[in-house]
Amino acid sequence: MLVSRVEPSLRFLGRFYRFMYEVPVRWNKENWKIYTSPKRKWFPYYVSMSIVTSLWLTCVYTLPTQLFLHRKTFGIVQACILTTGFGAFTVTMAAGNAICDRSVESKIFAVNQYLHIESALYSKYKPNTGGSKPLDSLDIILFIIQLGNFIPFLILFACLYWDLDGPYWVIEDFAPSAMYREPRTILAFLVVRALLLMVGFWETTRTITGSAMIMFTAIDSMTLFVKTLTHKVKSVTIFFRYYTHVSILCNALEGSSTLSFFLTITTACCLWILWIWVCVNGFGKLELPLYFLFLLATFIVGMAVLIFLPKVAVMGEAITKMPNIKRIEMRKKYTAWKSIQNKIAVKKSLAIRPFRFQYGSFYPMGSNFSRNTFGNVIENAMTVILLFDIDKQ
């Protein structure tokens, strides 16, 4: 179910970036498993991640140094673009670090095991998918996320035309003399900037869009899996078999999943607040291409947040209710037929715990998380809009 929902979107993403090298983590459709490419084929990926890291460093350098260098042509738009780049490059570097980590093989093994468990469960118990809907919220958000593939081309044009990128400010600070203002030197700097930005933007967009698709589909898949396990599986032995396996896999993936949720959700919410402020206060003040760029990013992330939070609430509710439902069910069986097996099942039901899905390592993802997150984002966005004006630099 997980693979069947996200595979078409990821395949389209791969075709969109077919001019780039392959991602080291691949999907084998015949064997129905994820695998990593041989290490000798990872060199292009290392190069692209090095470029992303260098762009991240230019953002880290440019933003704080503006406080005491006071560059005359550095304004609010430049700060917003570099802040956006800092957040996007951070998420991309985190994803790259997870792929290059030594434990990636064990994590991939855990995911493959979940895919086989999910397939085995659905082959015996048909899940309640809500009927034959032609379109649902997951299909909508997977389509909207694909619109983000056009952002790198827009932002590349904007950065080169209006000098908004980090490498430009590094060059301006370290090569300010007249000897670097010759046409040949300016052209060489422009080519270097263009190459760095193209590779960095393409890799960042491909990583973030692919990761977002997988995250949305994983939450949808876990919700359906838990509901099927809770309401369809009546055999105590089969229930505990699936429950134990998935609990072990969740514990194995807990470190990477909590960090991914924390970093992705925090970055998305902070940048969404920033972009809302730019779209509201920048109307009629920014150049039309720049304003459209911020508007497109605000729409994509806004729709993602509005669909993601309700899905998290539904998943959290399903995970939280599962232990109580199964305990009551097993107690009813023991009341109706007081056998040793039913008595053992009642005692084992006391050990049932919700699967762990957390924001960081301190906030369980559920209805409270979704409600508080949405309220905090809207409250902070309104505060920023009312307190700061885009003309202030």
Image (spheres, helix red, strand yellow):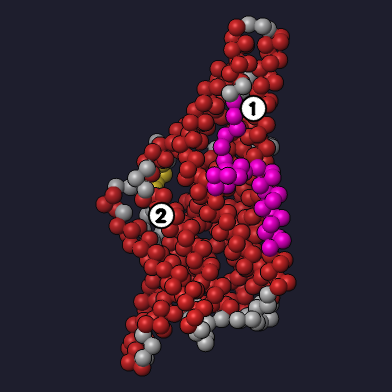
| Tag 2 residue | 96
Q: Position of residue 301 (x, y in %)?
A: 61, 60
Residue 210 appears at what percent x and percent y? 49, 53
Q: Position of residue 27 (x, y in %)?
A: 41, 44
Single out the mark in the foreground, 2 or 1: 1
Q: Is residue 133 left or right of residue 112?
A: right
Residue beneath the point at 40% across and 53% down: 97
Judge whether residue 380 can be spotted in this image.
Answer: yes
Q: Which sits earlier in the primary sequence, circle 2 or circle 1?
A: 2
Q: Amino acid at mark 2?
A: Gly
Q: Nearer the viewer, residue 255 or 4?
A: 255
Q: Residue at x 53, y 40 (%)?
A: 2
Above or below for 101 versus 90: above
Please report the residue visible at 37 percent of the width from the left and 54 percent of the height from the top. Answer: 22
- Asked whether the residues under the numbered discs 2 and 1 touch, taking CB atoms below 8 Å apart as contact, a structural biologist would say no
SS assignment at label 2: helix
Q: Which mark is residue 323?
A: 1
Amino acid at circle 1 = Pro
Q: Write down the region rendered in magenta.
A: 352-380
Label 1: which secondary element: helix
**Residue lying farthest to the left in this orientation:** 40
